[in-house]
Image: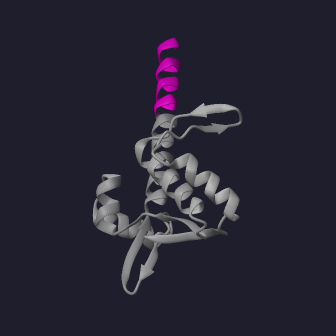
Amino acid sequence: MALIAPRVTAGLPADDARNLAGSLQDSNDITVFVDGTVHRLPEQARDAVVDLLARLGRGETVTVSSVEEMLTTSQAAELAGISHTYLRNMTDRGEIPVEYRGTHRRIRQAAIMAWLETQKKKRAEEAAGDDAQKGQKASE
């Protein structure tokens, strides 16, 4: 897993921290508004937001970071539905970016998902081209 740049937020002033802590006491009901639209958070996201707010409510300095999933070549190949050897060859050719941890290759899950999306688009374009050729032959 690769750590993505964290964000550090200083603790709240004492009055703000007390008010927030009081609001959170005995309540997990968190409503999130984004551009005036109400969003219900899934349980895990809600728990993370409540935890973040509780820490700020205690006046703690908080660091928020995320971790990007790094896969072994075997995991990446399985996810992509291709052989381990084919995947290694693609990383050697630079078709899929790879990072090394010592002598071990690691591939970002996002890179595999992006490759799968390009494959899907290529297949759709090829199918559309085949359909156009069939239609042209039928009209001749």
Magenta-colored segment: predominant secondary structure: helix
Residue at image location 28% in from the left, 66% down from the top:
74
- Does 30 appear in magenta? no
Q: Farthest residue in the top direction? A: 139
Q: Nearer the viewer, residue 115 or 65?
A: 65
Question: What is the number of callouts on the image?
Answer: 0
Observer-nearest residue: 53 or 8? 53
Q: Is residue 30 above or below residue 102?
A: above
Residue 35 coordinates in the image, percent (x, y): 71, 36
Image quarter (top left, top right, bottom left or bottom right) of the N terminus: bottom left
Q: Nearer the viewer, residue 128 or 72?
A: 72
Query: What is the basis of the colouring in this image?
Result: one colour
From the viewer's side, name the closer residue of 60 and 77: 60
Q: Position of residue 138 (x, y in %)?
A: 47, 14
Report x, y in % for residue 75.
Answer: 30, 62
In the displayed structure, does residue 137 sit left or right of residue 38? left
Residue 88 higher or lower than 103, as above or below = above
Q: Is residue 100 above or below residue 138?
A: below
Which residue is pictured at 50% across the width and 42% down the height?
A: 122
Give residue 120's position: percent from left, percent from top: 45, 41
Q: Is residue 78 left or right of 128 when viewed as pictured?
A: left
Q: Residue furthest bottom?
A: 102
Magenta span: 127-140
Q: Residue at x 49, y 39 (%)?
A: 29
6 in relation to 35, above or below? below
Q: Is residue 138 magenta?
A: yes
